[in-house]
Image (tube, helix red, strand yellow):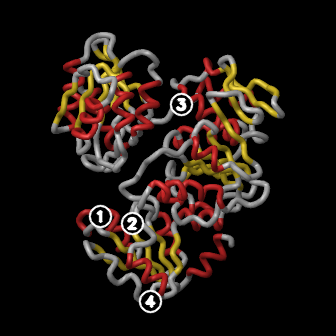
Amino acid sequence: MTIQEFKQKARGMKIAVVGAGVSNLPLIRMLAECGADICVYDKRTADKMGEVYDELCGLGVETVLGENYLDKIADGTEMVFKTPGVRYDVPALVEAEKNGAVISSEMELFFETCPSKIIAVTGSDGKTTTTSLIYDMLTRAGYTCHLGGNIGRPLVAEVENIKPSDISVVELSSFQLHTMKLSADIAVVTNVTPNHLDWHTDFDEYVDAKRAVFKYQKPGGRVVLNYDNDITRSFGEGRDGVVYFSSSRLLDDGYSLKDGKIVRTEGGRIEREVLDIDTIYIPGMHNVENYMAAAAAVEGLVEDGTIRRTATEFKGVPHRIEFVRELDGVSYYNDSIASSPARTTAGLKSFGDKKVILIAGGYDKKIPFDDFGVVVNEHVKKLVLVGFTSEKIEAAVKNAGNYNNLPIFRCDEFKAAVEKAREIAQPGDTVILSPACASFDLFKNFEDRGNTFKDIVKAF
């Protein structure tokens, strides 16, 4: 179905949009423009929505707001576009579907109507950097690319401007993938570790959501998978078009690390050297793995020379081990994107043998911290904790077998935590915000948290 065909179909249709956040606003504008009968359902009040509510009124869109906003959604609704944060199986949506409504999302509509090749990246960690690398490599190679999904901007309202010869590169979260019935032409799964267990019913459901990025792939598609992760390695069993990458072993076929170089192997032999990892600007073995995944994704589209230029010139993505400043001999880094123990672990390891002062803690996603406690004792010289998970992280560190009286400081407020890190730092130290938790206890999102950290540090 083309986007023009959808717009014709939507004219006069009674459509409910659940959530008027960033991903759905362009969709609401498009639906209003094509003459749909729209009602926006949002848990926020008009006052909390602010300018968004004013815009909806200007578009002539009906709104149902407040605590019980979904109570009447099943009444006569023909189609529902839900925000990724709302589960498909909430009773109101189940009832609407029983009454004949089609349940969809902005991203599902994009996949259904996009005329170009789609490269999609998901994973528990590394998906934003890998998505950005793929986009950078393709644009350097001369392709017209469109970046969106969980990064960049919502693309559904721009589908009319996307040509078949273009390439769309999207980052997808488990929330977005949860109800997907279409998959990308080239799908990348960086890794899968426990995450978002406060939202998913269990880890199996989370894994199944990640699998959707390639589950419905058409013949001729490609799936790029991390061989070193047990779950992603199992994703490739019995499938065609799988390309593995590994930083721990030389694969018979795929992308591997050999003598400090990323190499492409085929049929048990090294076919070519792709990239010297010493030329990669952004630090850490996890970023070497991100380059392997990106190189596998753009294989046949981008020459190795372009990949090498990206390696030397790509400076990373904000909030991902982002250097903020050096003050009084102390270096400050913002790794606010690290909203899981696995991601913070990768960030800590990127500093090699150097132990850092870590600021961690935040919203509890019901992820266990047992293994993380061991990592903290190995890589951290002083630990500053803030947020809902402070007590759990402290317990994990102290209960770890390698605990050796690591200095731990707990703070009630975020600013106090950053100031405490400065107070206990000495010349030559590194302070890093890498929370291992989501931000929703104190902030709107991880960007808000990272920007607040940078503002505090720059004001010292």
Q: Position of residue 367 (x, y in %)?
A: 37, 46
Query: How far is disc 1 from disc 4 in space, using C-alphas?
Result: 26 Å
Q: Nearer the viewer, residue 348 or 135?
A: 348
Q: Which residue is mark 3?
A: 286
Q: Is residue 89 left or right of residue 288?
A: left
Residue type at tag 4: Gly
Write the residue at 39% across / 67% down.
Answer: 19
Query: How far is disc 4 from disc 3 in space, using C-alphas?
Result: 49 Å
Which residue in the rendered view is the most extreme toward the front? 401
Write the residue at 66% across / 28% down.
Answer: 249
User: Is the residue marked by circle 1 packed among few (<14), some (14-19), or many (20+) residues within 10 Å?
Assistant: some
Query: How far is disc 1 from disc 3 in space, using C-alphas?
Result: 38 Å
Q: Which residue is mark 2?
A: 20
In the rendered image, is residue 160 in sight? no
The image quadrant that residue 343 belongs to is top left
Q: Which residue is mark 1?
A: 49
